[in-house]
C-alpha cells in the first residue's frame, strides 16, 4: 500500500467503516466470489459492468442490521424503476444493452456511480489493502483461502499457537503488510513494529501503542528504532511532525476573518469554525491587554467550548489546565502558557491546529487498526492496555532481531527470491503479498532454524515434548477461558442476555455488553455456547467446540463458516451439536430447515463411518419456532437420510431438538441432569421410529410404468 508523505495510514476507508470489520470483510469476499465466479461479472461500473452496482445491492441485503438506512439508494431505485428499459436491463444483467444505450442515460448512470458504485469501491478497498483481492477486486489466493479454510495448512510454528484458521490468515497478511513511499522503494511495516514494541515493553497503554504504530510511515527516519520504542511517551508522536506554515498565516498582526476561515476549516461542521474564530479573537484580545478581564473572557469561552477547542487545538491534551472558574493573575497566566504567548500566535495556533488534526486522525484510524489486529488472535487489548498473548511462544517465534529488521527498509536493498521490486511484492494477483505464505516462509525459517526455534520453545515448557506443546498451550487457554467466563459471564448475566435476543431493539445494548466488533448473530452463538457450558456443569470444552473466531481476549469476532454446525461438542460417549439462530419463526423454514438438517445428517454419518459409538444429538436454539419446521424435523427422525458429502452413505434417527432461549436459561440450573436430559431427548425421538423402505419410490414407479 502506497501512502503520501505526511499521510496517516488507514486500513479501512472512512466511507463504509464498521465496528464488525472482520465480519464485513468476510461478507464482502463472499459477495465478490458470487459476482466473479457465479455471475461472471468483471469489476467495473455501468456501462462496462454491473459488478459494482450488484456488490452494493448485495452488501446492504447481507447486513440489514448495519445498513438500516440507505435513503440515497432507495431514491435511486425509484428513479431506475421510472425508466423501465433500464430497470429491465439490470434485472436481466444485460450488459450489451447498457453499452448500446448508455448515451441516453448519462445522468442516471452518473448518479449510480456517485451514490452506489463508489461505495462498493470504498467498501472493498480494505480487501485490497490486506491482499485478499488485487486492485481489480479479483480474489487472490489468500482471499480464496479465507473463503475455504479447509485448505489451510499450518506450518510447524503456526500449529504451536492456539489460534484458528481465520486468525492465522490475518496474522500472515499483517506480517507481510508494508506501507510504501511514493517512489515505491522505502517501506514501513506497522504490524512488525507492533510486535517488536510489545516484545520490548511487554505492556503499553492503547494510546501509546497506537501512536507508536499509527504515527510512523515510510518517510519516517527514527535514528534507533529500539530507542524510539523504549523511550516513547504518550503524545510525543506529533511533536516532531513537520508543519509548513502558509505565508499569509505567519504574520505578526491579527489575521483577517477570511484568511482565518480559509486555513482553519472543519469539513464536518461550519459552526465549529465560528467557535474557532471567536476563540482566536479572545486570544488576540488577551495578548493586547493582558488583564484579568481578558483572561476571564478567554477562559469562560474555553470552558463553554472545551471539548471542541481541545480537539481542534489541544493535540490530545487540555489547552488550559485550570479548573472551571479558576482564574490565574496575568503574570502567572503568561508564564504558565509561555510557549503559546511568547511565540507568533498565528503560526503557533496553525501548527497546533494541524498537529491536532494529525493526532485526531491517528486516534480515528487506530480504531479500525485495532479491530484488524485483534483478528490475529495474538494481541490482547484489555482495559486500555495492550500485551502479547502467549508471550513465551511469541518471543520464540517472533524473535526480536528477526522482527526488528523487518520494521522498515528499502526494497531495492533486499535480497529475496520472492520479489525484486514493489510491483512483484504487492501489485497484482500473482504478487508475493497476495500469495499464500506461512509464517516460516515469511521469516524464511527453514530446517535447522526451525529446529532452533523449537528448542527455544521447549525451554519455555520444561519436561514437555515439542509435539505436546500445542496441547499444553490449548489446555492453558481452555482454563483461561473458564476463568474468563466465571469473571465476565456469571450465570445470571448470561440468562439476562438470553432474554434480550428476541427483541432486536436490544442489539445495541447487547453489543455494548459483549463486543462491538461482532454482529449480534455471532454474539448470540457465543452466549448460547456459554449457557450450554453452564448446563453441562462446566465440564465441556466449549472453547474448542465453537465454530467462532475469537480475539486473544476471548471476544467473538466472526462465525468461521466451513459448512459445520455453530457449536459441536465432543465427549467420550456423545456428540452434541448446537445450531443457534436469530431468525424469527416465519423465516426459519427458508433459512434454517435445510442447513440444520444437513449439518446434523453429515455429523451423524461421520460418527458412524468412524465407528466411534458416540450418540449424536442436535439442538436447535432460537427465541421462537416455526412449528412446521420443528415437526418436520421430528418426523424425519423416523426415516433414512442421505449424506450431502458422500451420496452412498445413509443414516437414520437424526435427532434435532428445538429449545428456546427461556428454556435454555432454565436448563442452566439443571446441570446435575445434563446426561439424563439428553438421553430423554433421544428416547422421545426413538418412540416413533418406523421401518422404512428407502427404495419405496423406485419400486412404485417401476410398478406403474
Image (tube, rainbow, N blue to C red):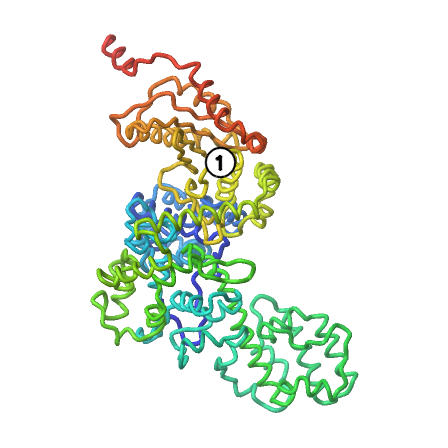
Vertically, is 478 above or below 334? Answer: above
Residue 605, picture quadrant: top left
Task: Identify the image quadrant of the C terminus.
Answer: top left
| Secondary structure found at label 1 | loop
Vertically, is 421 above or below 171? Answer: below
Which residue position is annotated with label 1?
Answer: 581
326 left or right of 144 in image: right
Of 216 and 47, the residue lying toward us:
216
Residue at 31% across, 73% down: 184
Residue 484 location in percent, x, y?
53, 48
Of 359 and 428, the residue lying toward us:
359
Badge 1: residue crowd in 10 Å (few <14, some 14–19, many ≥20): many
Vertically, is 10 above or below 693? Answer: below
Vertically, is 198 above or below 356? Answer: above
Q: Residue furthest bottom?
A: 252
Residue 14 location in percent, x, y?
48, 61
Task: Identify the image quadrant of the N terminus.
Answer: bottom left
Q: Residue furthest top?
A: 703
Q: Say whether residue 502 is visible.
A: yes
Q: Say whether residue 113 is visible.
A: no
Of 550 and 173, the residue lying toward us:
550
Residue at 28% across, 73% down: 411
Numbered circles on residues, count? 1
Amino acid at each position: 500500500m502506497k501512502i503520501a508523505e505526511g499521510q496517516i495510514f488507514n486500513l479501512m476507508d472512512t466511507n463504509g467503516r464498521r465496528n464488525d470489520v472482520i465480519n464485513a470483510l468476510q461478507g464482502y469476499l463472499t459477495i465478490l466470489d458470487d459476482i466473479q465466479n457465479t455471475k461472471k461479472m468483471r469489476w467495473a461500473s455501468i456501462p462496462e459492468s454491473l459488478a459494482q452496482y450488484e456488490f452494493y445491492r448485495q452488501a446492504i441485503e447481507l447486513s440489514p442490521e448495519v445498513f438500516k438506512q440507505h435513503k440515497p439508494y432507495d431514491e435511486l431505485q425509484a428513479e431506475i424503476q421510472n425508466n423501465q428499459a433500464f430497470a429491465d436491463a439490470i434485472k436481466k444483467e444485460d450488459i450489451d444493452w447498457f453499452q448500446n444505450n448508455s448515451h441516453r442515460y448519462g445522468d442516471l448512470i452518473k448518479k449510480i456511480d456517485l451514490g452506489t458504485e463508489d461505495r462498493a469501491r470504498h467498501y472493498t478497498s480494505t480487501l485490497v489493502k490486506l491482499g485478499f483481492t488485487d486492485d481489480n477486486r479479483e480474489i487472490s489466493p489468500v482471499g480464496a483461502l479465507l473463503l475455504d479454510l479447509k485448505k489451510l495448512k499450518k506450518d510447524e510454528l503456526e500449529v504451536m499457537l492456539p489460534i484458528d484458521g481465520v486468525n492465522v490468515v490475518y496474522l500472515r497478511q499483517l506480517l507481510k503488510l508494508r506501507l510504501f513511499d511514493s517512489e515505491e522503494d522505502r517501506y514501513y511495516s506497522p504490524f512488525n513494529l507492533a510486535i517488536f514494541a510489545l516484545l520490548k515493553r511487554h505492556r503499553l497503554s492503547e494510546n501509546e501503542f497506537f501512536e507508536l504504530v499509527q504515527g510512523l510511515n515510510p518517510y519516517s527516519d527514527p535514528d534507533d528504532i529500539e530507542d524510539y520504542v523504549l523511550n516513547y511517551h504518550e503524545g510525543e508522536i506529533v511533536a516532531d511532525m513537520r508543519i509548513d506554515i502558509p505565508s499569509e498565516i505567519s504574520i505578526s498582526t491579527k489575521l483577517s476573518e477570511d484568511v482565518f476561515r480559509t486555513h482553519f476549516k472543519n469539513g464536518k461542521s461550519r459552526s465549529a469554525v465560528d467557535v474557532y474564530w471567536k476563540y482566536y479573537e479572545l486570544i488576540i484580545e488577551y495578548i493586547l491587554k493582558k488583564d484579568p478581564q481578558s483572561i476571564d473572557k478567554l477562559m469562560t469561552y474555553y470552558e463553554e467550548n472545551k471539548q471542541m477547542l481541545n480537539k481542534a487545538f489541544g493535540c490530545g491534551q487540555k489547552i488550559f489546565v485550570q479548573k472551571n472558574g479558576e482564574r490565574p493573575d496575568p503574570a502567572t497566566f503568561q508564564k504558565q502558557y509561555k510557549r503559546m504567548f511568547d511565540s507568533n500566535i498565528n503560526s503557533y495556533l496553525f501548527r497546533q491546529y494541524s498537529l491536532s488534526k494529525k493526532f485526531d486522525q491517528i486516534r480515528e484510524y487506530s480504531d479500525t487498526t485495532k479491530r484488524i489486529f485483534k483478528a490475529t488472535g495474538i494481541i490482547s487489548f484489555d482495559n486500555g492496555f495492550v500485551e502479547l498473548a502467549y508471550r513465551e511462544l511469541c518471543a520464540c517465534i517472533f524473535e526480536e532481531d528477526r522482527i526488528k529488521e523487518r520494521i522498515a527498509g528499502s526494497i531495492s536493498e533486499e535480497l529475496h527470491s520472492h520479489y525484486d521490486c514493489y510491483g512483484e511484492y504487492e501489485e497484482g494477483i500473482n504478487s508475493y503479498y497476495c500469495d499464500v505464505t506461512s509464517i516460516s516462509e515469511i521469516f524464511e525459517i527453514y530446517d535447522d532454524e526451525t529446529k532452533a526455534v523449537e528448542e527455544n520453545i521447549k525451554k519455555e515448557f520444561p519436561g514437555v515434548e515439542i509435539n505436546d506443546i500445542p496441547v499444553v498451550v490449548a489446555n492453558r487457554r481452555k482454563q483461561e477461558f473458564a476463568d474468563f467466563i466465571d469473571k465476565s459471564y456469571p450465570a445470571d448475566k448470561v440468562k439476562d442476555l438470553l432474554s434480550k435476543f428476541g427483541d432486536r431493539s436490544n442489539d445495541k445494548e447487547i453489543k455494548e455488553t459483549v463486543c462491538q466488533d461482532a454482529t449480534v448473530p455471532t454474539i448470540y452463538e457465543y452466549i448460547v455456547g456459554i449457557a450450554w457450558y453452564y448446563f453441562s456443569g462446566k465440564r465441556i470444552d466449549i472453547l474448542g467446540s465453537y465454530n467462532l473466531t475469537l480475539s486473544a481476549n476471548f471476544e467473538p469476532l466472526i462465525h468461521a463458516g466451513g459448512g459445520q454446525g455453530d457449536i459441536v461438542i465432543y465427549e467420550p460417549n456423545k456428540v452434541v451439536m448446537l445450531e443457534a439462530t436469530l431468525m424469527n419463526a416465519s423465516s426459519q423454514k427458508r433459512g434454517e430447515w435445510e442447513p440444520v438438517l444437513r449439518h446434523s445428517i453429515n455429523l451423524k454419518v461421520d460418527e458412524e463411518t468412524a465407528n466411534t459409538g458416540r450418540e449424536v444429538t442436535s439442538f436447535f436454539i432460537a427465541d421462537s419456532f416455526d412449528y412446521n419446521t420443528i415437526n418436520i424435523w421430528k418426523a424425519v427422525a423416523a426415516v433414512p437420510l442421505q449424506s450431502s458429502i458422500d451420496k452412498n452413505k445413509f443414516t437414520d434417527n437424526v435427532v434435532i431438538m428445538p429449545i428456546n432461549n427461556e428454556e435454555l436459561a432454565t436448563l442452566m440450573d439443571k446441570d446435575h441432569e445434563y446426561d439424563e436430559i439428553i438421553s430423554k431427548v433421544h428416547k422421545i425421538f426413538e418412540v416413533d421410529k418406523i421401518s422404512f423402505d428407502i427404495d419405496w419410490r423406485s419400486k412404485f414407479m417401476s410398478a406403474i410404468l
